[in-house]
């Protein structure tokens, strides 16, 4: 199983081999981005083979980055995706992907079929440009930038551009203080957070493998920029210029590209975060692509269930447990000895001094969040005999079934009848393609029951016999 660790700022250095060779053209997959926006995003990370898997918590939900294979193996990426699916299924977690590149979107859509949801928020698209456009500002398309550069060089004939070194840190901090006092007077929260991270990243430039440059006029720093090479692109993380120095922005952008883009084919100037002024500025440089970072949500069979069903069999009625049976349901769920083969001990999660109704409320909450579909097993006379549950819904139309009965109800074939009926309901109404079940090795009675209910034994491990059934069986 995947074991995620929370990323500390210093941990981002471990991602360098994957980020430096990435070809997805996504700025989020860079050391500078992960360092500067760590306070906001701070992903967890795990390794699966040579594949890096990141996930971030946003609005109470986990989003998994599309996995990155160090060797570039497509097969390794698919194996990592399958492992993420298992992880989510085992942990009752919805499978949300983020930062899915366009080149991988169709594959995920085909993988999850009609039960997939895709979104592409305009505010988070990265602006990608041909690096050569910034190095030359050639042609009519870039006449505006070229004119600004000419104006700057004419007004400040003593201008100079140089590479940033550690010795420049104090001078750049002083420049940033001046920039901050004027540019950030509106008190924009995101801008305030960004400038704080700019200060924090200066001492880390060398460790992060970042490049930076300083534009001076009249012996004074008037602009500063920093970025890093990721695959075939140069990502611009920082670009600041003082007001009153016309042309400073296009000048620093060009000089930075000349100094650091090297053989890079593209320059990524990141997203506009929905700021219309910033959007206008980025569009004026004529991007060749707005790089989408797709969100993909994979659905499961349970998502189609609007309510719990009622299923009638020859002797039984499977239906949601009613309030009138809350106390009896609590007896079933709280009998530790009876439930030792259920695989769950309520004492691990039940709040102290909780009322008996907590058991039924918890079961209803599990359906509300689409974790499982619990039904009471009732006699035709209305007596609660036990419970049958569909749970562990997977992302390829799988589900698992479990059943438990009161002691007095055992030995009558009720479990077998309930399992068979609910399985057939899942096949016909929920479009489940594979029903799974398991029982402890020492639970021979459950093993026989599952076989009689039409399940096929497909193996065992150190703990369980495992069973499955498909519609054609």
Image (cartoon, grey):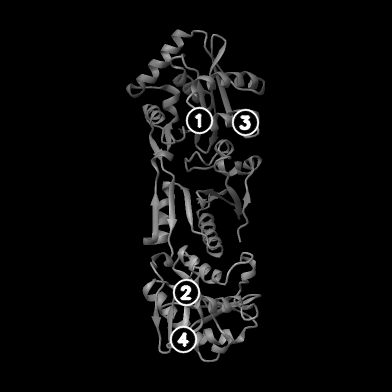
Q: Quadrant of the C terminus?
A: bottom left
Q: Nearer the viewer, mark 3 or mark 1?
A: 1
Quickly name the residue at label 3: 200
Q: Earlier in the sequence, mark 3 or mark 1?
A: 1
Q: Residues within 10 Å of mark 2 (few under 14, many from 20)?
A: few
Quickly name the residue at label 1: 191
**Gap between marks 3 and 2, in whole Å?**
57 Å
Q: Residue furthest bottom?
A: 412
Q: Answer yes or no: do the residues labelled 3 and 2 have beta carbons within 8 Å? A: no
Instruction: Please report the residue visible at 63 percent of the width from the left and 48 percent of the height from the top.
Output: 6
User: Horizontal placement of 24 versus 310: left or right?
Assistant: right
Instruction: Please report the residue visible at 46 percent of the width from the left and 32 percent of the height from the top.
Output: 269
**Gap between marks 3 and 4, in whole Å?**
65 Å
- Mark on residue 323? 2
Q: Earlier in the sequence, mark 3 or mark 2?
A: 3
Quickly name the residue at label 4: 417
Q: For the residue labelled by badge 4, is the local secondary structure a helix, a strand or a loop?
A: helix
Please say whether residue 164 is visible from this viewpoint: yes
Q: Nearer the viewer, mark 2 or mark 1?
A: 2
């Amino acid at each position: 199983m995947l074991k995620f660790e929370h990323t500390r700022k210093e941990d981002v250095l471990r991602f360098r081999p994957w980020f430096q060779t990435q070809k997805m053209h996504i700025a989020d997959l860079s050391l500078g981005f992960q360092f500067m926006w760590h306070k906001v995003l701070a992903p967890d990370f795990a390794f699966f083979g040579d594949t890096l898997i990141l996930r971030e918590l946003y609005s109470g939900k986990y989003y998994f980055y599309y996995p990155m294979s160090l060797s570039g193996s497509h097969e390794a990426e698919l194996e990592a995706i399958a492992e993420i699916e298992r992880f989510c299924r085992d942990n009752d977690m919805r499978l949300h992907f983020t930062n899915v590149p366009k080149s991988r979107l169709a594959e995920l859509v085909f993988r999850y079929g009609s039960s997939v949801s895709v979104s592409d928020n305009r505010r988070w698209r990265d602006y990608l440009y041909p690096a050569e456009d910034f190095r030359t500002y050639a042609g009519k398309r870039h006449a505006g930038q070229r004119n600004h550069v000419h104006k700057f060089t004419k007004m400040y004939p003593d201008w100079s551009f140089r590479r940033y070194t550690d010795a420049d840190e104090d001078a750049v901090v002083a420049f940033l203080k001046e920039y901050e006092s004027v540019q950030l007077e509106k008190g924009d929260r995101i801008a305030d957070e960004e400038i704080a991270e700019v200060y924090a990243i200066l001492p880390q430039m060398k460790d992060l493998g970042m490049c930076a440059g300083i534009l001076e006029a009249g012996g004074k720093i008037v602009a500063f920029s920093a970025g890093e090479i990721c695959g075939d692109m140069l990502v611009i993380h920082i670009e600041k210029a003082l007001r009153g120095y016309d042309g400073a922005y296009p000048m620093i952008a060009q000089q930075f590209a000349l100094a650091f883009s090297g053989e890079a084919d593209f320059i990524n100037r990141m997203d506009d975060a929905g700021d219309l002024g910033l959007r206008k500025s980025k569009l004026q440089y004529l991007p060749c692509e707005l790089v989408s970072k797709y969100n993909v949500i994979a659905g499961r069979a349970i998502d189609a269930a609007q309510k719990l069903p009622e299923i009638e069999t020859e002797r039984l009625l499977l239906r949601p447990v009613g309030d009138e049976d809350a106390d009896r349901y609590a007896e079933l769920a709280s009998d530790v000895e009876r439930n030792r083969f259920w695989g769950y001990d309520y004492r691990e999660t039940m709040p102290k001094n909780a009322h008996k109704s907590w058991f039924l409320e918890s079961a209803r909450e599990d359906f509300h969040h689409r974790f499982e579909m619990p039904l009471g097993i009732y006699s035709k006379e209305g007596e609660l005999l036990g419970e049958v549950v569909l749970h562990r819904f997977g992302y390829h139309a799988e589900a698992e079934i479990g059943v438990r009965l009161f002691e007095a109800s055992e030995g009558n074939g009720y479990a077998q009848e309930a399992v068979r009926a609910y399985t057939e309901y899942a096949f016909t109404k929920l479009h489940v393609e594979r029903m799974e079940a398991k029982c402890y090795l020492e639970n021979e009675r459950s093993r026989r029951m599952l076989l009689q209910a039409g399940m096929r034994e497909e193996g065992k491990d150190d703990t369980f016999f495992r069973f499955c059934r498909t519609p054609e069986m």
